[in-house]
Image (cartoon, coloured by chain):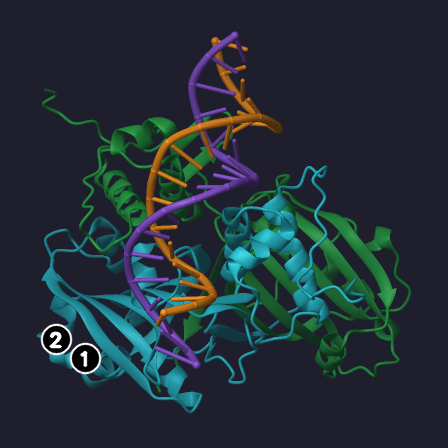
Chain colours: A cyan, B green, C orange, D purple
Amino acid sequence: MSPTPPPWAIPLDSASDLPVYMQVAQGLEQRIHSGDLRRGSALPAERELASHLRVSRVTVRQALALLAQQGLLTRKHGSGTFVTPPRPEERPSRTLGLLSSFSEDVRSRGQTPGARVLGFEHVRPSPQEAMSLALSPGDKVYRIRRLRTSDGEALAVEDSTLPAALVGELCEEDVSDASLYALLGNRGLQPVRAIRHLRALSADLTLSELLGVAPGAALLATERVSWTVGGRPVEYARAHYRGDRYDFVMELHGDGE
Amino acid sequence: MSPTPPPWAIPLDSASDLPVYMQVAQGLEQRIHSGDLRRGSALPAERELASHLRVSRVTVRQALALLAQQGLLTRKHGSGTFVTPPRPEERPSRTLGLLSSFSEDVRSRGQTPGARVLGFEHVRPSPQEAMSLALSPGDKVYRIRRLRTSDGEALAVEDSTLPAALVGELCEEDVSDASLYALLGNRGLQPVRAIRHLRALSADLTLSELLGVAPGAALLATERVSWTVGGRPVEYARAHYRGDRYDFVMELHGDGE
DNA sequence: TAGTGGTCTAGACCACGTC
DNA sequence: ACGTGGTCTAGACCACTAA
């Protein structure tokens, strides 16, 4: 009857060994990449898709969840499911290779950095912290958890640990808006060298809530130890960045082999 | 009756506004971190957990899926669900800041690098490729997709694009085991500078299959353009690394502010 | 108010591992 | 053969959004 099938029609092969929900996901993905489903356009309701494809709603949801997790689809409770529109704005890029702080990175993109202190402790270090900062278990550290924002939008959760004996007295207000690096610089403890690890992991419930992403969303996790002149470790920092909003950039120079 | 509740007993509050599956996930996560559930130990079967917690199996599965995605749990079809044991071996670390290839990185960890060619094309560049390599749409490129392994285990999928006019004749055997950088070096095209972007994203169906991870698993994605002496772009490469097996390391040097 | 996605249930059958 | 996780169904109710 209809010469042109609707753009969300998916060929399903019940004889295939590929699970139905994967076939649906794959089909929709192709439709999106081919342009049949335009960016920003709404998908049919889950119940509608299910009845047309002759599968249960649960199966449809399983397929949509896969694509939503990749960022291909955006689901809006009470409103509908949409093909994710392209982001017009560039994501903030951190330029690696130089020692720069979150605040400087965001500012260099013309946006306004912010910080909300989520935790402030003056405690004995964990074994991990003691090792990274070359401390004795009896020493004390400041442990600070902050939500880092750009133009008000949550971008990262940063956990910083500073040796109390080295940095001196510190209170929550000191770290509430300024960059930690600037604060250290004021006290003559400007870091001059750092080693940083980067990896990818899935958001747990705590991080997903803080960053406003779905549980399981891909995050870029970093771990860093910074040293001041003389080789004294001055900061141990772990940070989790939203994978869909942050981009690390670095320039590499070769020395032959 | 039983003075010590089983280690997987979870307190559920039906009045809470937190969904039941999240309460289950949160409870299990605490039990794991507290050590009540030992690394490597098996969880009760899903049906058993469901009946004891008085929830449906689907709800239990939703909770387990969350934790499995974070890597906290490992599910084995036909066998059971286990608390993920810690990995004894270090993950391969790529040292950034220097221009080094995948092969060199893996070898520097004492492991054996490998490559399986998944695709080899001699075609006109995509707009993206043409832009990155400063080519005209009429030029041709070699496009190579390889599965990169370390001691036989899949670690990354690498998509490399090389300008055909610059690198000269190339066939599939040329890229089947050696490092691309070594090959370029042999032809006098050793890259001396590169810009690399890093971000985190969730695995789609294709990548999850190739890398042997679950769909939606966190991957570390990189994009790189390399230049040879004289500023001629010689390679445009995109790679997706398993987030749970790969770790980028870099050393940073500050120049004050 | 009507329609959407979010959560949850109580089943069923299949595919895989182990014994 | 049996128990496991993997997939799928046909419903239900809730929470949110928009008209």
Give the residue type at disc 1: Ser
Residue A172: assigned label: 2
Q: Image height check: is A241 above or below B16?
A: below
Few, some or many C-alpha atoms within 10 Å of disc 2 (few <14, some 14-19, many ≥20)?
few
Q: Quadrant of the N terminus of chain B?
A: top left
- Residue B42 is at least partly visible in this image: no
Query: Residue beneath label 1, please?
Result: A176
B115 displayed left or right of B198? right
Q: Image height check: is A255 above or below D13?
A: below
- The residue shown at (53%, 68%) is B198
- The residue shown at (66%, 62%) is A8
Q: Label 2: chain? A: A
Q: CA distance from mark 2 to mark 1?
A: 6 Å
Q: Residue furthest bottom?
A: A110
Residue A254: assigned label: none
Q: Image height check: is B72 above or below A29?
A: above
